[in-house]
Each structure stands twice: as C-alpha cells, then as structure tokens.
C-alpha cells in the first residue's frame, strides 16, 4: 500500500508506454491480483508492484465475428462471454464461464486475465487450447500473434514480454464443431479444479469425427492438448468416441500430489472426464 | 489519492481514495457504508457483494479507480428498483429466518437482488446459481433459498401474552442485520483510534530475539511497537482456570505458526505499510512437533514445563468390564483440523479510561465475562475495571469463546493511551485462532446375538495444538459421550489431549463428540452387518430412553426422546432404502446409498457450575426491560430469551425492550457454548419473568393466574386491580438465576455430568460417482428431541446449519496450517452443496428446562457426518475411516477394496 503507483491510461499507446517504462502488474478484472495481494500482506509483505489498470482503454471489451472466426477483446469478462450469441463451438468455454468462482468473479474477471495468469488450474485455458485460439499481443514493435499453446511456457509463466500486453484472443472458425467442458472439484461453486477436460469436436453429416481437439487442465504445470488422442479420434464415429480413450493417451501429462488430490487420482480422473466429455458429444 | 466520481445508491458521489484500494475499503472506511462486509478480501466469501453497473461483484476485488462513472448499489440502497427489491427481500429474509448472525446477509441480499432484477420469477436452481458466490456458515442456505423464492411483503405477527413460547416469530434483532446497520467488530471505532497490526510467527517452533525496536518504530513512523515486556499484568491467557498457558505476545519462543510476537501501533497507513522483513527479529527455528503422534513419541521435546510427555490431560470413563461377544467390531479413525470459518474475522477496538486503569473493549465474542476476566488479568487490573461490549457476532461456533483481539487491543491501548482498533485478516484469523481438535481414535464395540450392545472401548488422542484452550473440556466430554446414545453396560473410554506445535485446537460445535460419533456409528454399522440386522433396527433396539442409565451412571428420568426420533425417521428410512435398491439394481456408475446415525449431547458444562443470571425491570414510566447478558451469535438467543421471559411474566413480547450483553449493564449469563443458552439462560429468563410476576401479584394481592395488561404506566392485574406504576416509590425489578444441577465425575467418569441431554438421529441419502469418487448428499432427514421448540423457525435454522457444517466435516473441510489459510483452499459448503433437508422436531419436555426446552445447536451437527459415511458405505461398500472424504480418498479406498 501507499507507495504503489496506479496507472489507468485511456489509450493503448499510453498503456504500452507505461508497460515499457516500468515493472507493472497488469490489472483488468482484478480477480487474481487482489487475492494475491491479500495473501502476501497477511504474512507481512504489504508491498505491491505498480499497477497498470487497462480497464479504461476503449475497444477491448467486444467479441467480434471476423472472416476467420471470432476476436475476443482482452476486457471481455466471463459473464460477457456467456451473454454473447456464439455458436456451439464455444459451449465448453461457456460452461467454464459458469464455473469460474461465483457470479461476482464472473462479472469482473476476464478470459484473457485467466490465460495470462497461466495457473495450471485456470478454467479457461484448456478450452482456449481446444478452440485453437491465438493470442494477439501488442508491443512496442506492433502486433504479434502466438498460438495459446506457445504462449504458455510453464507454471504461471507465459511468453508475454515485459513491454507487451495481450489485447485479444482469436478463435478460428471450424464448421460443425461442438465444444464441451468437464470440471471436477470438491464442492459446487467457488472451487478450484482438481482436474478438467475440454474439447472441440467437428463431425460430418455421417456422424464421423472430422477434427478433434482435446485438452486437459490441472493435470500438468500447464494445460495441454492430447495430440495422440486427437489423431485416433479423427475418423471415428462420434457415438463410439468415448471408447477410444485409453490410459496411454495421457502419457504426456504430469499431475502432482497436492491438497486437492493425488497424482494417481488425477491421472485416472482425467481419463474419466475425457470419456464423459466424449460421451456427451463434447 | 484520486477523486472518484460515481453514482452510489442512486445519488452522485465523489470520494477521495487510493485508486488501488478495494472498493469495499473505500465504502467502509471513507464513505462510512459499513453494511458491505469484508470476510476474506480475496473474492472467496462474497460478503462484500455489491452491484456495479447492475451486476453483482465482490467489492473487495474492485480497485476503487474502476468505479469512476459507474453505478454502485450497496445494501444501504433504499431508492429505485434496487431499493424496492431489497425491501421485499428483507421482509422475506426476516419471515423465513434467512439471517442468523447476519454477516453474510448484505452479500446474500445483493446477490439475490442482482437475480431478481434480471429474472422476477426464478426457479430454485437459478437462485442457487445467483447465490453460489456467497458463503453462509450459519443457515445451511435452505431458508435463504426459501426467502429469495418468496421475496414479497410478509405479514408480521406478534404473539399475544402467554403465546410467545412455541411461536415462529421473526428474530427480534433481524432488521439491523438486513439493512446494514448492525455493528459487527469491524464496523465501529472511535474516530481517533489508532490501528494495531500483529506480527506473527512464520515458524511453528522457534526462538527469536528482538533488536532495536525503538529505532524501528521511529523509522517506520509507528506510535508504538508492543512486545511481551509491555503486558502490564500477566502475559498469559487460557480457558482452564488453573492453566493460563498462552502468552498474549510471545516472549522469545513461539510454539505455532501464527503466534503473536509484536504489535505495531500507528496510523492505518503506517501499520499497513510495514514489511515484517524490515523489523529487527532474528529467528532461530526449532524442530516442530506436528500431530499428536509426533508429540507423544518417547523422544519428543517437551513443549510446556507442566506437561511431561506433552500430555495436557486425560479423561476416562470406566464402567464394568468390556469383553468380546457374538459380534465384534473394531476400527481406527482419523479426523483433521476443522476451521470455524465464521464469515466475520475477529475485530474490535479498545478504549482506555483516562485513569490509566479502566478499559473498554468492543469486539465480537461468545463469552463477554470470560473476556473481561482474561483482559483484566493481562492488564493487571480488577475485573470491574474492564468493560466488555460485545459487537454483533458474525458467527462463532466455538471459535470466539477464547479471547483473540481483546488482550492485544487492551495492551496496545494502554501503551498508546488512545483507543486502538484491529481487524484480523482472514489468513490471520485462520492461522491464529482455535480449530476443531484432530482426533486419532481406536474403538471397539461388541453385541450379543440379538444385537444388544454389550461392550464398548474407546481410546483417542486429540491434538490440542500449542496451547490448552478447551483441550481439557474435550478430554472430559468425549469419554462421557463416546459410546453413543445406547444402552451399554461395559465401557472403557479414554481421551487424551496432546500438546503439539500445531494451531491451538479449542471449542468447535460439539467439543470432540462429532469426532467420536464418526467412530462409534461406523462400528454400529459393522455390528449390524455382522448380525444381518438393518442399521435402523440395531439402533432402535439399543436406543437409550427414559428410565435408562447412561454410561456415567446417570438415570435419564425425563426428556430422552431418541426412540421417538428413530420412530419418526422409520418411514423415510424405508423409503430411502427402497429408492437406493431400485436405483442400484442396474449397477450404475453413480450409485445411491442411505445412511443413519444417532447422537446424544449433554447441555451445559461438564460437571461444572455454569450459572446464568438475568434482570427484568418494569420502570415507573411503563418501560419493561430485560437485561440479557447471553450473547446472540446468530442462533437467536436474544429472541428466545425474550419469548420465554414474556410468557413467564405474562405480558406480550412486543412490550419488551432489551439491554443485551454488556458486562457493565447485564449480569453474567455465561458463555454461548455447550448448547446451554436456551436451557440454562432460558431457564434464568423464565425465573426472571416469574420473579417479576410474583412481585406484581404480591403488590396487587392477586391470585397466581391473574392476567396482566400494561398500558402506558397503568398495569392491570386481573379483573379488579390496576397498579399505577408512576405512583410507585421505585421501579419494579426482579432477578432470576439458574445453574443446572450436576455432580462431579469420579475417577471412572461416573456421576451426573449434565442436567439434561439432547438426542437426535439423522438419515442421509447420497450419490457417489464411483468412477470419480465424488459424493453428493441428496437428502438429509433429521429428527431431534429439543424438549420444546421455543421458536421453531430458529430451531430449524440451527438444525439446517448444523447439518451443513456436518456435511463439510464429512466431505471437504481440512485445515492444514500454512497451506489452507484462506477460503479457496479451505472449502466450506456452498449453496450448491447442501441437500434438501427435512426435520422432525420431537418435543419430549425437559422438566429442568424453560417450558420443557433444552439445547439445540451442537446436537444438529453431530450425526450428520457419520450418517453420510454410513451412506457412502451403503453406496460403495467402502468404509471410510478418515474425514474429509475427498474424492481422491474415496477413489483410493474403492481401489483398495477391489484389490
């Protein structure tokens, strides 16, 4: 408290200049920054990095349909996403939106904030992976784009440089695609995921899977896609998809033991969640 | 600091505030709108829910800068659409008993208003979704859901003279809990108060030395830094009269993570800005004893000079000689620390008297007179020099029986010579205040061929943490109750409280009995299985009842309604079993299970005097005032005492005024604990009403059944006589006192430890997703013998809330020091976790109790967890002997069973 500078610019240029000039914590919905500050202060560290509040920058709060798909501004909240008329490919992300915190958090927290925090348990992240989303990053040298999978570099770590800001997510169109999400927690509402599965499945008129994009969250330091499973799902009759999932498809995940569950349980639960996800036609 | 212009409750508002300060802080501290409560400052509890641009949001997660130009509505809103919806909600909350302690009520109301403004006629699922972000620890949510679904103007009803007892009237202190005006510990302080921040040990066991504090004080701009050396009296507190083992401020040695060692006193900005690392503290960490097993080891270091082997106390009960029989069950059971998780963290202020002796403390508490005694000892002054004014108490459940902020504030205020205030952070509250004792239990039980219980043995170690707190109470109460509410002739019970380097364990709704019940009820199910008996049937055959003798040799002469409780549950039990059998016939992945458990619970302190005393005055101006020192922590004692006293006197409740819980103005009504207020203080309230009635009747020379009527100063007594109160030489005053008759327990735990017992049984229907190990409680049916339901709405509220806490104990709650010191890692049930609850109130009157009433609060919690475990076993075949049954634990147990 006290010494923390607080910037609330009204243009992206100003925001980028502040970002480039100082070590700032970027604040949009505040739903991660305040709990972290509270936790530190409780044990005797009330200091905080200077804050760059990007919420007053216009034009970042919209979901637009583009030629390639959709562009989700970095200030779009969970409840903003829920209210938006979007096709079934977004159903998984919308399901996650209903399960992040309570409605209080959903109405302030942003999808992009969830991604940038890069918690292994971020509920939006496996969905963004399954949506094949791209991160649109503004920096001093202009705009660059990175697939979400490349943006996430580790436990609470991303490829975002200290002078950059994520300004949007881009989700490519996929015809006849359906999104789905399964979250596992120890209570209803307000719960950090023990494990979660997200998927986007496209099918043809014969009911065969033409594209499968499957991701798991809270099962490794970062959420990750399951390419081996996706490969074997392609061409399968969707009605049979759940039977395709086998333990070896999860070889790449590295779950941990923590207060919420054991690694062995997470590995098995992930398998169950995947089968449930596919059973429910993603 | 910036100027922020926005619309607040419909009116333009400009405030100067730090841009990064949470909106909740700006509302409370700069705008004086303390109706918005702060329970966690992390978005975990929802108590601070407000509407921002029409959508519910946690004010603690919003930087004040972000409300520039926004519309903000708080619980104080009275105008416009929000005001109108809030008015309807308030009426419904009052009528349905949806507010207990009231600390979550503003958040609940705002979340509900958000919904009703979007959807005027929501269904129950939509209400759940809307309220899912607000935690309530008192109500079990059922009445809140009912109220939101019935948000309409409600007929209010005030009972006639003689008809208050048994009436489901709205709580008398409810209005202030619903309009944001009730004053909790953080809601009031003198304008010139300094702030106190406590520096706490990050180590579970360590020595420390302090450097130049005066230099640090100056450099940090503080008024004072208080240490153990600043404690004017005895630097010690504790529950046991003969054992004050916990320092207010540690003196060179800390015994648990979170122990206080320094107090920083200064302006709010100054104390908040201090980094602990900037203080001259040198730590020398020592090995820490975590858990009772480590502390009981032969080579374990001794933590207190008075406790060889780290044994605080051992409680025993021996009756005849246990032996094996036709059926024999044995098991080892473990439970963890459980956090009270009241939504109000401890808070208050102390105001020193100018004489350098007196001290007034305003803080949340369950035990004002005990706070007075502890604070006086710490200050080294006479008890009557200290005045305790209890704030509204935002939940207690046993956790606010011990002092927390009180002695710290008093020492700081004495040193500063000014009022000093404090608000604990959630982490500080969780790390430093007491918990439910973790238990490690081995128990055996035997039955004959007819299923009659013949022997019971119980041996348990309770981890009492670094300081004694209520460890002795647990060790004494548990052996008396461990065998459960059954006729058993041979028992050998032992409970030990062991010191460790963990968080102090103290009182939590049930004092160790819920842990014991988990073990015993599981063994009862084992015996039923061995003998091929239905689980209800074996309990009914053994249920203790009127005329039976307890395990401590006490004959239950009256009010022993367990058989009636079980009988009331039988149709539901049969239906539940049939539903389970039908559902599970196809061996589905999600299986159903039904479970059952019973309990008994002695009301009042164990074999100890615990009197209550009250006063009632009828003044010459016609005002009728009950001076009631029983602290209402949400359970409703303010209302219940009034109902009882009104009927005893014979005047309508509406004519009563109240002076509540203030050690300078009310007598000692004892602690709000041990399910004693309705029974003990209620009886004192009855005696008080009767005493004033006798005085009036004597004045009027009227017969015992004379009807009273009060109109201004005219008191009509019977048909013929009118007393003009204004003409009396003095106000009419009467007192009543009650101390339940008990006797000391002998070395074998034999005697009359309690004047009366509550009894209850519950059945639970659960579903278990066997693939994921996830348990969902679908339904609970409770039957509880309450003697007499003085206020059925309040009684149901206690039962619902107890069930919700029992569900948490069974399925999700586990405090791990240093790891779950917040409300997102420490999980308590949300509105989505609590099942449909049906309650059968059994009223087997207790002759000692007021109008037959006895305690309610703790009994409701005790059977829930064992009933849920019984149901999980029925669903899966797995007997869980460790709680909480987290999904991974059940999944592992199922795998072990299959191997």
Image: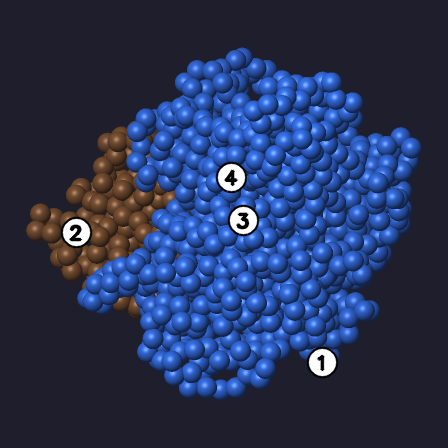
Chain colours: A brown, B blue
**Nearest-to-viewer mark from 3 and 1:** 3
Instruction: Tell me whether marks 1 and 4 sit on the same chain.
Output: yes
Q: Residue furthest right?
A: B355
The residue labelled by disc 3 is: B853
B425 and A126: which one is in front? Answer: B425
**Earlier-in-chain disc, 1 versus 4:** 4
Between the residue at mark 1 and the residue at mark 4, the CA separation in whole angstroms equals 57 Å
**Nearest-to-viewer mark from 1 and 2:** 1
**Earlier-in-chain disc, 3 versus 4:** 4
Q: Position of residue B130 (x, y in %)?
A: 39, 36
Instruction: Tell me whether marks 3 and 1 sit on the same chain.
Output: yes
Q: Residue, x 28% and y 51% (percent of image)?
A: A199
The residue labelled by disc 4 is: B165
The residue labelled by disc 1 is: B298
Q: Residues within 10 Å of mark 4 (few under 14, many from 20)?
A: many
The residue labelled by disc 2 is: A210
Q: Residue, x 38% and y 83% (percent of image)?
A: B449
Between the residue at mark 2 and the residue at mark 3, the CA separation in whole angstroms equals 70 Å
- Is B867 left or right of B306, judged from the image as shown? left
Q: Position of residue B10 (x, y in %)?
A: 49, 15
Q: Quick check: marks 3 and 1 in contact, CB under 8 Å?
A: no
Q: Residue, x 47% and y 49% (percent of image)?
A: B799
Give the vertical position of A6 relative to B748 (above or below).
above
What SS does tag 1 mark?
loop
Q: Quick check: marks 2 and 3 in contact, CB under 8 Å?
A: no
Between the residue at mark 3 and the residue at mark 4, the CA separation in whole angstroms equals 10 Å
Looking at the figure, which quarter contains the N terminus of chain B? top right
Q: Position of residue B289 (x, y in %)?
A: 69, 69
| Quarter-of-image position of residue B718 | top right
């Amino acid at each position: 408290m006290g010494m923390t500078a607080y910037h609330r610019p009204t243009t992206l240029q100003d925001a980028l200049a502040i970002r480039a000039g100082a070590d700032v914590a970027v604040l949009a919905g505040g739903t991660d920054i305040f709990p972290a500050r509270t936790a530190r202060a409780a044990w005797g560290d009330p200091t905080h990095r200077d804050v760059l509040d990007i919420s007053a920058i216009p034009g970042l709060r919209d979901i637009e349909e583009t030629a390639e798909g959709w562009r989700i501004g970095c200030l779009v909240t969970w409840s903003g996403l829920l209210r938006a008329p979007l096709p079934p490919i977004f159903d998984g992300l919308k399901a996650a939106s209903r399960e992040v915190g309570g409605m209080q958090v959903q109405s302030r927290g942003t999808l992009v904030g969830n991604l940038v925090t890069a918690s292994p348990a971020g509920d939006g992240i496996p969905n963004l992976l399954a949506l094949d989303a791209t991160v649109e990053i503004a920096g001093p040298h202009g705009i660059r784009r990175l697939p979400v999978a490349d943006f996430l570099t580790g436990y609470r770590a991303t490829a975002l440089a200290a002078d950059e800001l994520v300004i949007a997510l881009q989700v490519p169109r996929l015809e006849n695609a359906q999104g789905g999400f399964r979250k596992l927690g120890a209570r209803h509402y307000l719960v950090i995921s023990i494990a979660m599965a997200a998927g986007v499945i496209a099918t043809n008129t014969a009911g065969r899977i033409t594209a499968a994009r499957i991701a798991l969250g809270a099962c490794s330091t970062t959420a990750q896609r399951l390419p081996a499973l996706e490969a074997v799902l392609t061409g399968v009759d969707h009605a049979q998809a759940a039977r395709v999932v086998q333990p070896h498809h999860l070889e790449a995940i590295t779950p941990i033991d923590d207060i919420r569950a054991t690694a062995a349980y997470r590995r098995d639960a992930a398998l169950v969640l995947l089968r449930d996800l596919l059973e429910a036609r993603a | 600091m910036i100027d922020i212009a926005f619309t607040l409750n419909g009116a333009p508002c400009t405030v100067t505030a730090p841009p990064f300060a949470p909106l909740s802080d700006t509302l409370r501290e700069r705008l004086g709108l303390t109706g918005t409560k702060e329970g966690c400052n992390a978005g975990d509890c929802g108590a601070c829910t407000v509407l921002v641009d029409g959508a519910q949001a946690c004010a603690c997660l919003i930087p004040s800068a972000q409300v520039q130009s926004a519309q903000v509505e708080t619980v104080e809103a009275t105008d416009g659409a929000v005001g109108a919806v809030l008015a309807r909600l308030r009426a419904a909350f009052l009528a349905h008993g949806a507010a207990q302690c009231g600390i979550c009520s503003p958040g609940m109301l705002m979340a509900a208003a958000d919904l009703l403004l979007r959807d005027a006629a929501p269904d129950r699922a939509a209400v759940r979704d809307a309220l899912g972000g607000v935690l309530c620890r008192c109500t079990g949510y059922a009445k809140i859901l009912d109220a939101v679904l019935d948000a309409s103007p409600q007929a209010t009803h005030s009972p006639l003279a003689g008809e208050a007892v048994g009436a489901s009237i709205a709580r008398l202190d409810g209005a202030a809990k619903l309009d944001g005006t009730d004053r909790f510990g953080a809601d009031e302080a003198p304008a010139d108060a300094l702030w106190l921040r406590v520096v706490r040990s990050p180590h579970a066991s360590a020595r420390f030395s302090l450097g130049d504090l005066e230099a640090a004080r100056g450099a940090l701009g503080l008024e004072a830094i208080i240490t153990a050396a600043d404690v004017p009296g005895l630097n010690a507190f504790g529950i046991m009269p003969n054992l004050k083992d916990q320092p207010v401020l540690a003196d060179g040695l800390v015994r648990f993570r979170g122990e206080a060692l320094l107090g920083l006193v200064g302006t709010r900005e100054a104390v908040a800005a201090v980094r602990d690392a900037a203080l001259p503290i040198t730590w020398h960490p020592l090995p820490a004893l975590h858990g009772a097993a480590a502390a009981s080891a032969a080579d374990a270091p001794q933590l207190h000079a008075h406790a060889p082997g780290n044994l605080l106390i051992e409680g025993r009960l021996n009756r005849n000689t246990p032996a094996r029989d036709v059926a024999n069950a044995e098991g080892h059971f473990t439970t963890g620390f459980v956090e009270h998780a009241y939504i109000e963290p401890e808070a208050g202020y102390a105001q020193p008297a100018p004489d350098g002796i007196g001290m007034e403390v305003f803080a949340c508490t369950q035990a004002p007179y005990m706070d007075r005694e502890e604070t006086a000892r710490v200050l080294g002054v006479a008890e009557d020099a200290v005045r305790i004014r209890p704030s509204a108490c935002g939940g207690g459940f046993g956790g606010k029986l011990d002092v927390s902020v009180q002695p710290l504030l008093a020492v700081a205020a004495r040193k500063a010579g000014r009022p000093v205030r404090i608000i604990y952070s959630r982490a500080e509250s969780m790390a430093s205040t007491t918990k439910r004792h973790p238990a490690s239990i081995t128990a055996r039980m035997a039955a004959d061929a007819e299923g009659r219980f013949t022997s019971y043995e119980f041996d348990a170690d309770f981890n009492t943490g670094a300081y004694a707190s209520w460890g002795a109470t647990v060790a004494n109460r548990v052996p008396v109750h461990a065998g459960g509410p059954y006729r058993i002739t041979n028992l050998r019970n032992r409970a030990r409280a062991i010191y460790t380097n963990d968080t102090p364990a103290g009182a939590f709704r049930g004092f160790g009995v819920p842990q014991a019940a988990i073990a015993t009820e599981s063994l009862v199910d084992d015996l039923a299985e061995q003998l091929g008996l239905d689980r209800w049937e074996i309990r009914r055959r053994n249920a203790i009842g009127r005329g039976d003798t307890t395990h401590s040799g006490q004959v239950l002469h009256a009010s022993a309604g367990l058989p009636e409780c079980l009988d009331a549950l039988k149709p539901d039990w049969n239906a539940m079993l049939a539903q389970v059998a039908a559902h599970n016939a196809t061996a589905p992945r999600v299986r159903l299970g039904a479970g059952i458990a019973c309990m008994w619970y002695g009301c009042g302190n164990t074999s100890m005097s615990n009197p209550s005393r009250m006063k009632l005055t009828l003044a010459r101006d016609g005002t009728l005032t009950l001076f009631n020192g029983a602290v209402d922590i949400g359970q409703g004692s303010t209302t219940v005492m009034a109902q009882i006293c009104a009927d005893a006197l014979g005047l309508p409740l509406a004519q009563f005024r109240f002076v509540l819980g203030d050690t300078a103005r009310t007598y000692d009504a004892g602690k709000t604990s041990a399910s004693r207020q309705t029974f003990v203080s209620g009886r004192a309230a009855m005696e008080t009403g009767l005493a004033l009635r006798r005085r009036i009747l004597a004045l009027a020379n009227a017969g015992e059944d004379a009807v009273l009527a009060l109109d201004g100063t005219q008191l009509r007594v019977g048909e013929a006589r009118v007393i003009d109160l204004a003409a009396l030489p003095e106000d009419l005053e009467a007192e009543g006192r009650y101390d339940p008759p008990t006797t000391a327990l002998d070395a074998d735990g034999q005697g009359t430890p309690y004047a009366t017992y509550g009894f209850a049984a519950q059945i639970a229907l659960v579903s278990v997703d066997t693939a994921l190990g996830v348990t969902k409680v679908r339904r609970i049916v409770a039957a509880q013998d309450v003697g007499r339901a003085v206020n059925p709405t309040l009684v149901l509220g206690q039962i619902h809330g107890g069930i919700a806490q029992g569900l948490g104990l069974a399925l999700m709650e586990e405090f791990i020091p240093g790891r779950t010191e917040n409300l997102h890692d420490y999980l308590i049930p949300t509105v989505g976790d609590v099942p449909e609850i049906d309650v059968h109130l059994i009223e087997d009157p207790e002759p000692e109790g007021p109008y037959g009433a006895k305690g309610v609060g703790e009994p409701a919690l005790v059977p829930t967890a064992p009933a849920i475990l019984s149901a999980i076993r029925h669903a899966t075949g797995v007997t869980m002997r460790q709680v909480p049954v987290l999904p991974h634990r059940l999944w592992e147990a199922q795998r072990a069973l299959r191997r």
